[in-house]
Amino acid sequence: MPRTPRIVGLGGGGDTEDGTRLLYDYALDLAGKKRPRLLYVPTAVGDADSAIVSFYERLHGRAELSHLRFFPWPPADLRELAFAQDAICVSGGNTANMLAIWRVHGFDAVLREAWQSGVVLFGASAGMICWFQAGVTDSFGPGLAPLRDGLGFLAGSACPHYDDEELRRPMYQRLIREEGFSPGHAADAGVGLVFVDGELTEVVTPREGATGYRVDADGETPLDARLLA
């Protein structure tokens, strides 16, 4: 039976390792299985071995884990691999480079089809903004810049690290107010924005006082967040 499309966009990891695990547990629980099959996609960090090791250390015993490398080339069965999963986790890193690699190999289309079939998609930072039409990124250099060609699974724009990187908030608001950037959503570090069938349904966090925001040309509106414990 078809399942509802779900995405959990994380504004960044929790402020503790336990907090980060709570966020991952929340996303994995959406799969509805005690031990879901989880694929890690670290394209945004160039398939770094350290990121892959950290992923396995963090989630060992929580799910049936695997990972997808695009270097030196991806496996031939990308669609079969994605559809074998209950959830797919995308790393942080360079969003623009990641999207370019995915598009060259057709993985963007694979992800859309998997998402529409009910595979849960989640990730932090690059793993958050990639699902939207646009986002605030440091993909093009040490400064922040607009990224206007996201995957578009979710409408509008997004900004992670809203409270832990001081330039993100003013940049995002200026882009929307002055440069025609689509209104959208922002998330503090350690905050999960939960989208079901393309609509925001819940904001969750292990951090007291952290939350998500709706941001448009008139400013930001804080959203109610449920505390994970």
Image (cartoon, rainbow, N blue to C red):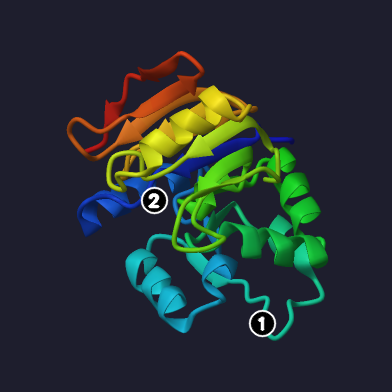
Q: Quadrant of residue 59?
A: bottom left
In the displayed image of the protein, which residue is found farthest to the top?
Answer: 218
Compared with 163, 78 (above or below) is below
Q: Residue at x 34, y 32 (%)?
A: 204
Compared with 86, 78 (above or below) is below
Query: Which quadrant of the figure contains the C terminus?
Result: top left
Residue 160 percent location from the top left of the image: 42, 43
Compared with 218, 29 (above or below) is below
Residue 63 percent location from the top left of the image: 45, 61
In the displayed image of the protein, which residue is found farthest to the bottom?
Answer: 72
Mark 2 lies on a secondary structure that is helix
From where the camera sits, is residue 18 visible? yes
Q: Determine which residue is flagged by label 1.
A: 71
Q: Determine which residue is flagged by label 2.
A: 24
Mark 1 lies on a secondary structure that is loop
Q: Amino acid at mark 2?
A: Tyr
Query: Which quadrant of the figure contains the N terminus?
Result: top right
Q: Nearer the viewer, residue 98 or 167?
A: 167
Q: Amino acid at mark 1?
A: Phe
The answer to whether the residue labelled 1 contacts the one labelled 2, judged by CB atoms less than 8 Å apart, is: no
Q: Residue at x 56, y 42 (%)?
A: 135
The numbered mark, 1 or 2, whose residue comes first in the sequence reads 2
Residue 11 percent location from the top left of the image: 40, 44
Q: Nearer the viewer, residue 49 or 25?
A: 49
In the figure, is residue 125 to the left or right of 13? right
Q: Nearer the viewer, residue 111 or 180?
A: 180
Number of numbered discs: 2
Q: Residue at x 46, y 13 (%)?
A: 218
Q: Nearer the viewer, residue 163 or 74?
A: 163
From where the camera sits, is residue 193 visible? no
In the figure, is residue 220 to the left or right of 8? left
Q: Quadrant of residue 181?
A: top right
